[in-house]
Amino acid sequence: MAKGNSERDPEVSEDMVESIDELKERLSVMKKMMEERKAAGSHTKELFQGQASSLQGTTMIDGNFLSFVFGGSLFVIISVSVYAFYNLYHAVLKKFPSTHTEL
């Protein structure tokens, strides 16, 4: 058993060294990309906030429009639910009619 483990150790260490080298390479590439973005300009913060000069003329969906859309969707869902329960109630009444014995 010990002999088998000693045979696997070089293979495992080679795989680990390769994966570590790949990770180091990826990290250096990401660092270079971030440095290039920082060097490209200070407008990146404005782009993320939607206030960049390149976005000034574009029309974006605002909060009022989204609230109208979601409110309409909520109204449709509630109305369909009420309609379904109304039909279900009448179907149950039709299936199991109540007999009146007071007459």
Image (cartoon, helix red, strand yellow):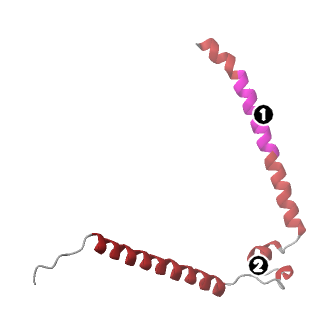
Q: Amino acid at mark 1?
A: Glu
Q: Is residue 55 magenta?
A: no
- Residue drawn at the location 42% of the way across and 79% of the way down: 82
Q: Quadrant of the N terminus?
A: top right
Q: Which residue is mark 2?
A: 50
- Residue drawn at the location 51% of the way across and 83% of the way down: 75
Q: Quadrant of the C terminus?
A: bottom left
Q: Amino acid at mark 2?
A: Gly
As drawn, 33 above or below 16? below
Residue 57, given in percent of the width and then of the height, sits at 84, 85
Q: Secondary structure at mark 1?
A: helix
Q: Secondary structure at mark 2?
A: loop
| Quarter assignment of residue 72 | bottom right
| Quarter assignment of residue 46 | bottom right
The total number of labels drawn is 2
Outermost left residue: 102
Q: Residues within 10 Å of mark 1 (few under 14, many from 20)?
A: few
- 75 vs 99, nearest the viewer: 99
The part of the chain drawn in magenta is 10-25
- 60 vs 55, nearest the viewer: 60
Q: Is residue 23 magenta?
A: yes
Residue 38 falls left or right of residue 6: right
Residue 15, given in percent of the width and then of the height, sits at 74, 30
Tag nearer the camera, 2 or 1: 2
- Residue drawn at the location 66% of the way across and 85% of the way down: 65
Q: Residues within 10 Å of mark 2 (few under 14, many from 20)?
A: few
- 57 vs 11, nearest the viewer: 57
Q: Which residue is mark 1?
A: 18
- Residue drawn at the location 85% of the way across and 66% of the way down: 38
- 97 vs 63, nearest the viewer: 97
Residue 13, given in percent of the width and then of the height, sits at 72, 27
